[in-house]
Amino acid sequence: MLCVGLDPDVSRMPAELQGRPDAIFAFCKAIIDATADVACSFKPQIAYFAALAAEDQLEAICAYLRDQYPQIPLVLDAKRGDIGATAEQYAREAFERYGADAVTVNPYMGHDSIAPYLEWKERGAIVLCRTSNPGGSDLQFLTVEGKPLYLHVARLVAEKWNSNGQCGLVVGATYPAELAQVRAIVGNMPLLVPGIGAQGGDIEATMRAGRTAGGAGMMINSSRAILYAKADAQAGESFAQAARRVATETRDTINRFRQQ
């Protein structure tokens, strides 16, 4: 259930890649090849590419994933949220340009901002629900009909928006009690769970709170802890080998708590 996040920060890339015009692609490709057999999904964060006008390298990475690892879902982390024709274009960007299997979306503008993604019935829309950042409480804890807003979102998605069975929710590992509440509402709906690794989320608590009865149901994302494991690398490890070591350790820890 390990999702490997691809957040390529050029300032943290190894020296051998610095200055290369294809550094972002080369870095992500090496991470993908090193971790593909322990990952359930890959999640490129579009901002890390777009900020450097490197969308062509994101396209190349997505094409590489589809060609070499078609069995591994590609989740585009874009957190899009807009209405009407604009949302339609964002959906085309995610599903046509990048060929993503799923995309993260923001529900703040309501169902008509999500509907264009749901028209792609073989693709996924993963809706922000209870996010891993501390500031998420500013809005997500507002009371709606006696319950916090994030639980209203969870129920809305599970009971009304997921008619094609293509929705998921983003729920942070940093709040396991709230993760458990969401799981109780949405049944076996898949959850994208950021917040372990660099953000400090606890894997055991996350598994106990968020797994389904079958011991599955989550894509538990780790990005920086895997990508930049080289900083704590063992002697002689390359950045890709260090990433693989941390990814494997994370996968094994997740699996240890699947059925407990």
Image (tube, rainbow, N blue to C red):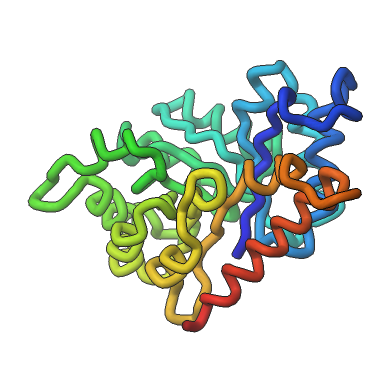
**149 relative position to 5: left or right:** left
Regarding residue 10, the answer to whether it shows in the image is yes
Q: Nearer the viewer, residue 93 or 46?
A: 46
Dividing the picture into quarters, in which one does residue 46 lie? top right
**132 relative position to 246: left or right:** left
Dividing the picture into quarters, in which one does residue 175 lie? bottom left
Q: Nearer the viewer, residue 158 or 242?
A: 242
Please state the total of marks drawn on the protein image. Answer: 0
* Residue 162 x, y percent position in the rendering: 40, 57
Judge whether 224 appears above or below 166 on screen.
Answer: above
Regarding residue 70, the answer to whether it shows in the image is no
Judge whether 10 appears above or below 244 on screen.
Answer: above
- Residue, x 50% and y 82% (percent of image)? 259
Residue lying furthest left: 146
* Residue 176 x, y percent position in the rendering: 36, 60
Query: Which quadrant, please, contains the N terminus?
Result: bottom right
* Residue 114 x, y percent position in the rendering: 41, 40
- Residue, x 47% and y 68% (percent of image)? 204
Residue lying furthest front: 235
- Residue, x 48% and y 49% (percent of image)? 200
* Residue 21 x, y percent position in the rendering: 88, 20
- Residue, x 90% and y 49% (percent of image)? 236
**58 relative position to 15: left or right:** left
